[in-house]
Image (cartoon, helix red, strand yellow):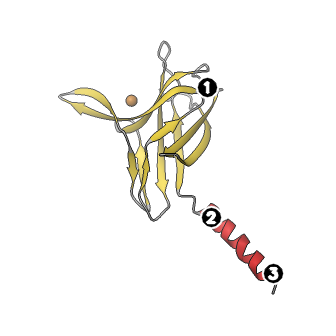
Amino acid sequence: MRLAPLLLLLLCACEEQATAPLLADNIVITEAIPGQTMSAGFMTLRNNSNEAIEIDAVRSTEFAAVAIHESSIENGIARMRPLKTLTIAAKSHIALQRGGIHLMLMQPKGSGQSGDDISLSFYSGETLLLELTTQFSRGNQ
Ligand SMILES: [Cu+2]
């Protein structure tokens, strides 16, 4: 019966991967509009865990700063305000999208245009929740 513990270990490893606590899909990072130094990030964030996830920092090695913003229309004027945290309820998802919550990626270290790889790291305090690599999406300004 020496095989049994090993088998159990392997099963655990698979299970862990299939249930990563935070996942992102439908990722769109806009190219900077000529003359500007900002890109917007849109995506769906999925919380697979049984506890709420609170993102309080997003970092990218390709940008000087990344902020979480929420857009709204006030008295007919489009505004954006920074959010300190982004909470995703247990077994739930939120959509970062135009006109709503989005990432604001500021001061690209590269060209800010297609062809550059972009890495994004999502944190809750010191805990790294999710790391992803993507590219700028063309024609999504
Ligand atoms: Cu913004």
> How far across and how far down the image is residue 72, in percent?
28, 34
The quarter in which the N terminus is drawn is bottom right
* SS of the residue under disc 1: loop
Does residue 30 sit above or below 86 in this rendering?
above
Cβ of disc 2 within 8 Å of ligand 1? no
Say few, some or many: other residues with alpha carbon within 10 Å of mark 2 (under 14 / 14 to 19 / 20 or more): few
Mark 3–mark 1 CB contact (< 8 Å) = no
* SS of the residue under disc 3: helix
Q: Residue at x 66, y 26 (%)?
A: 115
Q: Residue at x 64, y 61 (%)?
A: 17
Determine the CA span between mark 3 and mark 1. Answer: 50 Å
- The furthest residue to the front: 126
> How far across and how far down the image is residue 26, in percent?
52, 45
Q: Earlier in the sequence, mark 1 or mark 2?
A: 2
Q: Residue at x 60, y 19 (%)?
A: 111
Q: Can you identify the residue that label 2 sits on?
A: 16
Q: Can you identify the residue that label 1 sits on?
A: 114
Q: Can you identify the residue that label 3 sits on?
A: 3
Say few, some or many: other residues with alpha carbon within 10 Å of mark 3 (under 14 / 14 to 19 / 20 or more): few
132 or 1, nearer to the observer = 1
Does residue 85 sit above or below 48 in this rendering?
above
* SS of the residue under disc 2: helix
Does residue 104 sit above or below 101 in this rendering?
above
